[in-house]
Image (tube, coloured by chain):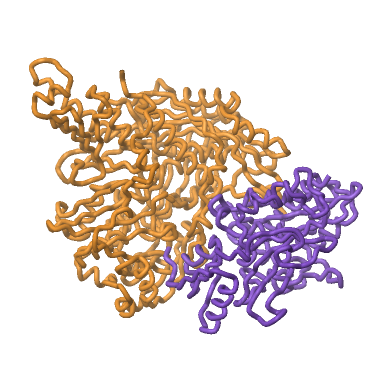
Amino acid sequence: MFPADFAYARARSLDEALDLLDEARAAGEEAKLIAGGQSLLPMMKLRLAAPQLLIDIADLRELGGGGWHGAADGTAAGPDPGYSIGALTTYRELGRSRLVNGALPVDHQGAAGPGGGIPAITDALAVLADPQVRARGTIGGAVAHGDPAADLPAVLLALDAELTIVSRKPAAAGRRVIALDDFLQGIYATDLAEDEIITHVSIRTHGARGSAYEKFPHPASHLPLAGVCAVVRLRDGRIEGAQVAVTGISPRPYRARETEALLAGVSPAPAILAAAAARVTAVPPATPTAPAARAPGAVTGAGSGRVTLLGDQHASAGYRAHLAEVLTRRALARAAASAR
Amino acid sequence: MSLIGRPLTRREDPPLLTGRGRYVDDFAPDGTLHAFVVRSPLAHARITRVDVTEAREAPGVHAVFTAADLAGLGAGHLPGGEGLPPGSLNPEHPVLARDKVLWAGQPVALVVADTPERAADAAELVDIDYDDLPAVTAVLEAAADDAPRLHDGTPTNVAFRKRLITGHADQAFARAAHTVGQRMTSQRIAPVAMEPRGVLACPADDGRLDIRLPTQRAHGARIWLAKILGLPQDRLHVMTGDVGGGFGAKGPLYPDQVAVIAAALALRRPVKWIEERSESFTATTHGRDQVADLELAADEEGRITAMRGTVHASMGAYFTPNGPGSLLGRLGPMLPQAYRLEHFDVELVGVFANTTPIGPYRGAGRPEAAYFTERLVDMLAREMAADPVALRRRNFIPATAFPYTTVTGLTYETGDYHAGLDLLVEKLAEPPRTAQSTERQLLSQSGQLLGRGIATFVEPGGIVPKAPGPDGTIGDQATVTIDPDGKVTVAVGTSGHGQGHETAFAQLAADLLDVPIDDVTVVFGDTDTAPFGYGTFGSRSLAAGGTAIYNACHAALDAARRVDAPMPVAGAAARLGGITAGGSSGAPPETYASGAYGCDVAVDQETGQVTLLRVVAVDDCGVIVNPLLVEGQVHGAVAQGVGQALTEQISYDENGQPLSASLMDYAVPFAATLPPIESYSVVTPSTINPLGVKGMGESGTIGVTPALVNAVMDALSGHGIRHLDMPLTPEKIWTALHPS
């Protein structure tokens, strides 16, 4: 397992990293950013990726830290601010953060789940890869890789994640914020341009206390054959809002918006949750407020009303869809229980 | 106090567990070059052109070898299959492919460079043109008359047929009150040793070649190498060093290893090659890959009277030496298992296919025989609405009947199958031994389908060739040297690779010689310092190597008695200026260990996921030298047997491209898959050897696989499901539960 030859540069600042990206582009070289390396290095060893230049961004303090209302990216606090997480935050740091362990309230107004924190993140980190990967892998890398079968993107998607992305483009174009749902495009395909770096990922609970992540692991890789994150906000015993995101079964993680719509305003009884879960692979018709699919070519099965499904020798497309339904039911039940 | 039977911890573990083991890749003499193997990307193709010009000119490259280059060096072909019936095909297996490639992964060229990276880079410059041919990978399809032919000039891919026939099976079936039959597969799986294969060949100043080779049979590798390279054996010095697991796959000598050794000879430089993990899934032998169509007949009371049918076994693209033997010597003859049937008619068919060659893999025919028979016995029990335990008891060879010659002509020397099954039933009736098992039981109480399965088995071990070895002696040899200072060196021709031989053999010698165990050093795996032997495979080392050590120790004791006064052996050695004595295993028949395994499972009806709740293992391996080593063998083998039952499978697409050539796709069991394993023993000493020992290396893979599949089928029985082929993946089970 030997990667092809490559050059290596360790950037000391975000500015230097952006310069290196620009220089490589001008020279017609393929450059890749490396942070934790837990996805990129295996691909290089298998020679599925052969960048000519690796730009190591592990030292960039500008990509660390985190806090309420996007303190790091400077946006103002609104009524429902995001919590900003530095892109270089490792899975392990995330798992040890106050955000997850509950010492910090999960929204700025002080609401928190019964155990505090965001249970779905805890769930995902407990079943995500192994301790070595969790020690090195970063949250920015998890989204930048565009892996169709990764755990964390489903959780981030259900938490309405937005990415802050910077580049050397002039003026306002040099710094943009994009919803993760718009960023993910297909198998290892994202909206990240060659000259861009993700600096922060921000998430929003909308005050929801309840959440859960359910995973059915691939027997060998332990990546999700199917994974479902549910975030549930209850009021007076009824579901006020629910977000459901699915990974592993489709070219990219997606939001199950028809399931979400079916859950609005209902009581979380098992039969009702099951009926909503049964529509987890459905694509609702487009409406002005809920576009059918933000990356239509990637997710929507053409005219089928169903998301495009992946299948291979480990699990057929139909079985993965079935698993998604079962896991949705289970995730919703746990999320609703923890929301009380 | 006797050392036999004491659970001494493994003396080899401290260095291995603290990174001080010495594996082949830990050696890098000055000037070592590194090889990279160029392999066929296609499963079946004609080679029309090989151009290595550009690769030879790449930076750091010292040489590139093709089949033509090796022929120029006088290298011959690999050994073919052994023990074949008359009329069998036995095609030549080239070191590097010449005209055709027959499986995706077959070596075609070898690049030797300064560094492994440069060798890998240059390998991409080797330019080979192929004419693609249709490929066939499934054994029954390969056996068909209209299948694409692998080997030029042969009329069929069927390499051999052999019918084992005793009594009048058809008449017995005509008379039978109950019959069951089933097509069953034992799917192709990969051994997946922790240490991949490799080799380091170093031309020495004295004109010899020092070869570091992680192998299970140092002397055997030397014999094969001498033949292939046309060199006298004494010019070859094979050293195994520490070996990180073999499971049968490090028994054969491989074409890539031979090419590297030939390159070292040609370049007069040390050359090293270490297999990549992905290569190990296409270039290291696979195991199993059989399809059985078998039937059992029984009378009104459920006494099994006959078995008949056919077993097709893939050999892969070429024979390995022991590939045919797993079918002919193990799978077929062991089908009667622990039962007294009188009529037997089974045809064994060996078939070439465009797949990685099949070699022995932990059990090598034994697990398959037990799986097929124990599945059929459970089906018979279901058919008769009988208790699977009672049905087995009714058919067991009774303890009073030993030595017992089976319907296939094997003589089981001792055993008490009732005692093993009784103990299993007793232990299964008790609560699990550990809290983790109890937790798993609780986890299963949420609407899951519960099942229990058992399986019993008989395991041959301790095989020794009857013909003399290259030095004219019969059997495995051992030498015991007692220095004047009382230090003892035991050298033996078996070749451990992770089993704990240093500990077990030291226990044995210290006990027999009555010396402190810390004074005993055990040596093996080096053709210069260890006497001749057949190596370690097929649960043979304690029975064969242990017997040789026993005889050598007694010869040393005899020598010590020549001293006038009775005294400890160390004192005699001091008086005599040292004692050296040899011993041999001779060539006794095989021993027959046995066991009874039980599994509890829960099946998630919504997903088809199987949770293994409990494994209880009862083994009779005769006299136990070290119970800790026995339990360790059970644990490792159970893990591998569970892997075959639930998750492991080598698969190919319709063009013969491997679909499971990495640990991202090939599913070995994880620690969390396994519950704590409850291991128990019954002991019926063997009468074959002076130690009373039987084989122990494979029992877990033999017992747990059918017990686990029987348990899952028990869980699914309420849904009209009679049989599913392994691996029992969630999707397969869910689909069976929800036929649409």
> Is B245 or B205 nearer to us in this picture?
B205
Q: Is residue A63 visible?
A: yes
> Is B87 or B292 nearer to us in this picture?
B292
Residue B621 horizontal side relative to residue A283, left or right:
left
Query: Which image quadrant for residue A107?
Result: bottom right
Question: Which corner quadrant holds the C terminus of chain A?
Answer: top right
Relative image position of residue B508 (x, y in whole percent): 28, 28
Residue B147 horizontal side relative to residue A82, left or right:
left
Residue A28 horizontal side relative to residue A92, left or right:
left
> Is B670 or B451 nearer to us in this picture?
B670
Name the residue: 39% across, 27% down.
B7
- The mark tally for this picture is 0
- In the rendered image, the vertical position of residue B675 relative to residue A247, given as above or below: above
Residue B577 horizontal side relative to residue B172, left or right:
left
Relative image position of residue A283 (x, y in whole percent): 79, 66
- In the rendered image, the vertical position of residue B525 relative to residue B339, given as above or below: below
Name the residue: 61% across, 69% down.
A188
Chain rendered orange: B
Question: Which corner quadrant holds the N terminus of chain A?
Answer: bottom left
Q: Colour of chain A?
A: purple
Relative image position of residue B253 (x, y in whole percent): 30, 54
> Is B600 or B415 nearer to us in this picture?
B600
Query: Which image quadrant for residue B126?
Result: bottom left
Relative image position of residue B440 (x, y in whole percent): 63, 35
